[in-house]
Amino acid sequence: MKIMKFGGTSVGKPQRMYDVARLITKDSEPKIVVLSAVSGTTNSLVEIANLLAAQKREEAKEKIDVLEAKYQEFIKELVQKEDAYAQAKAIIQEHFEFLNIILKISYSEALSKDILAQGELISTKLFSVYLGEQGIDHMLLPALNFMSIDENDEPQVAAISEKLKAQVAQNSSKNLFITQGYICRNAKGEVDNLKRGGSDYSASLIAAAINASVCEIWTDIDGMHNNDPRVVNKTQPIEQLSFDEAAELAYFGAKILHPASIWPAQQYNVPVKLLNTMEPEAKGTTITSEAASKGVKAVAAKDGITAVNIKSSRMLLAYGFLRKVFEIFEKYRTPIDMITTSEVAVSVTIDTDAALPSIRKELEALGSVDTENDMTIVSIVGNEIAHNTETLQDVFNSLTGVDVRMISYGGSPHNISILVPAAQKKEVLQKINSGVFKL
Ligand SMILES: Nc1ncnc2c1ncn2[C@@H]1O[C@H](COP(=O)(O)OP(=O)(O)O)[C@@H](O)[C@H]1O
Ligand SMILES: N[C@@H](CC(=O)OP(=O)(O)O)C(=O)O
């Protein structure tokens, strides 16, 4: 059985849904197809939820109406037959009635998760109507019946596997299952999600849960590129990556993959392929446990980083100082990305400053603290690059004129990371493109 995940742009227009239907019926291998919401929908739902949280009901209502009008147009083009159109219309009515009812209920965090789930529920149901109209035999598998996270927001792979396998077995005559990415149930049984971009994570979890032959992530570009195509002009697709390399790139900002989406596939050894819906014949990127070649594969950038610098003479020749620092970040459930230390100072970076005021207050008991926000981590990723002096030379030569604040080297043989002000991100990515990739 294989998994095919199609992102927002791949289901963003009726024409794209037709392409998806063609791609999933090309071969006879049984498959679970994971769909995201139609592009732009989750952003609109986030705005609606935020407006409700701010008690701006009228503005929320306007946004709901704009979104509904968009779907009314969408279904006119999606299906031709009268009964299929009636089914699609009923789906739109059901979900927008729900949003309109929510307008009248007092806002809660749980309710906002219900709002965010509507995008994937609508896209999968509409796609199912289209498949039905085309006479393509399939079955909708509601993700809310099997995809779950625990009280620490961690997916429960064993439970997911048990439930999913049972549902597939109960419908053994079916060859094609359609399900929602992104959405899940939390430990309280409420509707929740796997965070923005989480449909890739859903696909990888499903692939792990049923030991799929492959997990295909279909998107709007021909694989993982060696640099961010939104920022840099000349970028190239990478044919092969190891799980470790792909995980580092996803974590450090390559938006094509959700940061957590590699570990389930890696743990259950399911190859991942990144493919282009608009160019299905292109090779794309294959991610397996093997690293095909040594050397730099790609560079990625992670924005929204804050650097926290702690200086203390008490650190000199002391032990246990770093533990105290780390315990404070742990207490506030704030992950640390980069670390550099000297005898009297330690600098770390974090990608969320939600708990920063409390963290800062506690750190001040250990020494003087200063913070810098609006920073970017640029990560150079490849196989064994930290053992290659030429790479290091190319990277440093590329950084002439760049205000480098931190360097992380040697922690992983596959990654060299530098911290720069966000304002220099574009320049740095471009310079590395010329200096390291010679592009
Ligand atoms: N290194 C990279 N390689 C490929 N795409 C990247 C990279 N970095 C950022 N991207 C962006 O990721 C986009 C695809 O991811 P995303 O928008 O999440 O797709 P989907 O909607 O299919 O899930 C591409 O259009 C591209 O602009
Ligand atoms: N719809 C969700 C989940 C997702 O993964 O979408 P996409 O595959 O379009 O990145 C979001 O926008 O966050």
Image: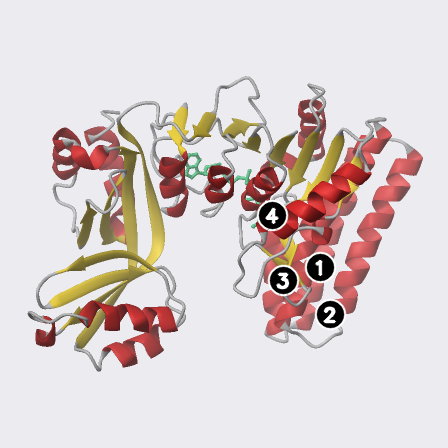
Q: Which residue is mark 3?
A: 186
Residue 336 pos. (x, y %): 32, 60
Of pointers 2 and 1, the one earlier in the residue sequence: 1
Q: Which residue is mark 4?
A: 40
Q: Tell me where residue 227 sits by quadrant.
A: top left
Q: Which residue is mark 2?
A: 103
- Mark 2–mark 1 distance (CA, rounded to whole Å): 10 Å
The residue sitting at 29% across, 52% down in the picture is 376
Amino acid identity at mark 1: Ile
- Mark 1–mark 3 distance (CA, rounded to whole Å): 26 Å
162 or 119: which is nearer to us?
A: 162
Q: Which residue is mark 1?
A: 64
- Against 186, is 299 above or below? above
The residue sitting at 83% across, 53% down in the picture is 93
The residue sitting at 92% across, 35% down in the picture is 82
381 or 105: which is nearer to us?
A: 381
Do tag 2 and tag 1 residues touch (Cβ < 8 Å)? yes
Per the image, label 3 sits on a secondary structure element best described as: loop
Q: Quadrant of the N terminus?
A: top right
- The reply to whether the residue tagged 3 has its Cβ within 8 angstroms of ligand 2 is no
Q: Please give left or right for residue 64 compared with residue 286 in the image.
A: right
